[in-house]
Image (cartoon, coloured by chain):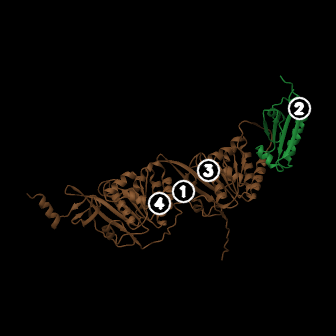
Amino acid sequence: MMGKILLKLYITGKTAKSERAIGNLNRICESDLGKEYELNVIDVLENPQLAENEKILATPTLIKALPPPLRRIIGDLTDQDKVLLGLDIVPSHKTPL
Amino acid sequence: MPKKIDVIFEKLPTGIAGFDQVSNGGLPKGRTTLISGTAGSAKTVLGVQFLVEGIIKFDQSAVFITFEECPDDIRKNMVGLGWDIAALESEGKWAFVDASPDPGVECVTSGDFDFGGLLARIEHAVRKVGAVRVSMDSISAIFAQYQDVSKVRSELFRIAVGLKKLGVTAIITAERNTEYGDVSRHGIEEFVADNVIILRNVLESEKRRRTMEILKFRGCSHQKGEWPFTIMPGQGVILIPLSAMELKQKSSNVRITSGNKELDKMCGGGFFRDSIILVSGATGTGKTLMTTEFIHGGAIAGERCLLFAFEESREQLARNATGWGIDYDKMEAEGQLKVVCEYPETMGLEDHLIRIKDLIEEFKPHRIAVDSLSALERGSSERGFREFVIALSSFIKDQETAGLFTSTTSTLVGGTSITEAHISTITDSIILLRYVEMFGEMRRGLTVLKMRGSMHDKDIREFTIDGTGRHIGKTFRNVTGILGGHPVYTANQESDTDRIVSMFAE
C-alpha cells in the first residue's frame, strides 16, 4: 500500500501556462493516481511568502511533498511520462515489470 | 540656435569609499548595473556592500537575491568584513530571496515554464522591507541550473524589466571567463547593459592587483579607466580614485624647520608647511638622519610627527636617534611622535596606502616622514608603485601637512632611482645627498635641487655627520660632475692644489 500522495502546484496568476499545467495535472492524477492523492494549487502572486519558503523560482512548479523523497517538476507538465517519472510513480496504464 | 536638451539621470550615492568619486556621484538611480568579474574578483562582496552601506549610511532598505551561495553562508562570510546581516534582517531592513540551488532535490523539466515565481518573490521582498537597493548574485549560477540557456536569458530579461518597474537601483553580478575579453560568460550584458562595471583581479609580478572599471553608464557621466581597490576587514571594498583626484591643495607660505639650521638657510628659511620633500641618496648618505632631524625639528616646535619606517625596526631607529642625541622614547611618551615599522612585503601597496591614510587621520600629525619610499617599490609593479606614490602625496598635501620621503639610489655615486622619476614632478622640494669620491676618500655632498616657490641655495655643499648630527660646510669648489657620479677635479686654485702638494710633501 502506497501512502497518501501530497502534491503542491505553484503557479503565477491565471495565465494560459497555469491553466495548461492545472489541466495536465488533473488528467494525470485521474488516470494514474487513483483516489489516494491531495492536490493544492498555490498562486505565488497571492502567497509570495509560501513561494519564498518553498524556494520557488520557475513556475509552474509541481512539488511532491509526500511520500518522500521530495520531488520537483517544473513546466506546464505536457509530457505525462516525464511527470510520472519525476514523481516516482509507475503509470497504472502500464504494467510494472 | 539648437535647443539644448538636458537629460539628467540622477545618481544614487553608494557610500562605497572612492566609488562615488569615480562614478561622478554613484550608480544611476532606478536602473540596473551589471557587475562582471572573474571568480574571486569580489563581486559578492561588492553586491553585499552596496546594500549594507545603503542601510547604514542612508537608511535605505535592501533585498539580496542569491543564486549561488545560500543565505546562511553569506551571513557567515560577511561577518569577517564586519557586517552583521542577521541584525539588519531582524530590524526589517534586509531581506533575502533565496534562489540558491538545492542539491538534495531532484528536479525534472516537463514543458514550458517561466521565472514568474522568482519575480513574485522579489516583488514581495521589495515591498516587505520597502527596498531602495537590490543585489542579484550571481546570475551566471542560474544558467547552470537549467538546460535551456536562451529560455533563462529571456526570463532574466523579464526580471530586469521587473526591477526597473519597481524603481529600485539594482546590481546584478555575472561571471566572466577571462580578465580581458567578453564582458560576461553568457552574453547577459545585452539586456541589462545600461550600465556595466568590470572587476579585475590580475596577477602582476606575482602579486594580485584588484581593479574596477566603469565600462559604461548609459546617459550618465563617469570617470574612465581602471582604479585599484582593496578589501579591508570592517570596511569592505575601498577604491583608490587616482585619476579622479583634484589638484586643489591650498598653498601656504608658512615655513617650518627642517631640523637643521644650515639646511633651513639653504632652502630660503625652511620647508613650506604643506609641501612634499624628497630626499634622494645612496645607502649611508644620511637619509635616515635627515628624517630624524626633521622629526626632531617638529618636536621642538611642538608639532606631532608620524614616521613610517620600511627598512628598520623601532629599536634600531630609536638607537640611531639616540646616537645623535635625540630621544624617540620620550617623544613617543609625550604623544609627539608615532613610529610605524613594517616590512613592505607584509601587504599590497593598496593596503599600505589605506593603512597610512587611516593612521594619518587618526594621529593627525603636522609632519609625516616615510623612510624609505623606495623600499615599498620592492613588492610591486612599476605602475602600481607610481599610482601609490601619487595617491599618497596627494593625500598628504590634502591634509596640509609636510611630508618628507626618502629614496635610495641604486648606485653609490650619482644616479637616480625610479622613485624620483615618478614623483619628482609632484614633490615641491628635492634634496640630493651624494657621495663625492675625492683623492681616495668618500666625502658627502648635499644640494637643494628644487624648492618650489622659493629662492634656494644652488651650491653643492660638503657635509659631515658626527654624534651631534649633520654639519653642512663649504661648497665643493673646483670639482665638477658630482651629480653625474664622476667628480672631476678642475685644478687651478688655492686650497685643493695645496692639498695635493701637501700629500706629496715630506
Mark 1 packing: few (<14 Cα in 10 Å), some, or many (20+)?
Answer: many
Please say if B437 is above or below B147.
Answer: below
**What residue does disc 1 label?**
B227
Q: In the rendered image, which quarter is residue B277 located in?
A: bottom left
Element type where label 3 sits in the image = helix
Q: Label 1 near label 4: C-beta < 8 Å?
A: no
- How far apart, in angstroms, are the residues tagged by discs 3 and 1? 17 Å
Q: Callout 4: residue from which chain?
A: B
Q: Label 1 near label 3: C-beta < 8 Å?
A: no
- How far apart, in angstroms, are the residues tagged by discs 2 and 1? 63 Å
The first of marks 4 and 1 along the sequence is 1
- How far apart, in angstroms, are the residues tagged by discs 3 and 4? 26 Å
**Depth-wise, is mark 4 or mark 1 nearer the camera?**
4
Amino acid under disc 4? Leu
Q: Label 4 near label 3: C-beta < 8 Å?
A: no
**What residue does disc 2 label?**
A32
Residue A63 appears left or right of B469: right
B267 or B219, which is in the foreground?
A: B267
Q: x and y percent of residue B2 in the render?
A: 66, 74
Amino acid under disc 1? Trp
- How far apart, in angstroms, are the residues tagged by discs 4 and 1? 15 Å
Q: Which chain corresponds to the colour green?
A: A
What is chain B's hue in the picture? brown
Residue B122 appears left or right of B403: right
Q: x and y percent of residue B414 in the render?
A: 30, 58
The image quadrant where one finds the N terminus of chain B is: bottom right
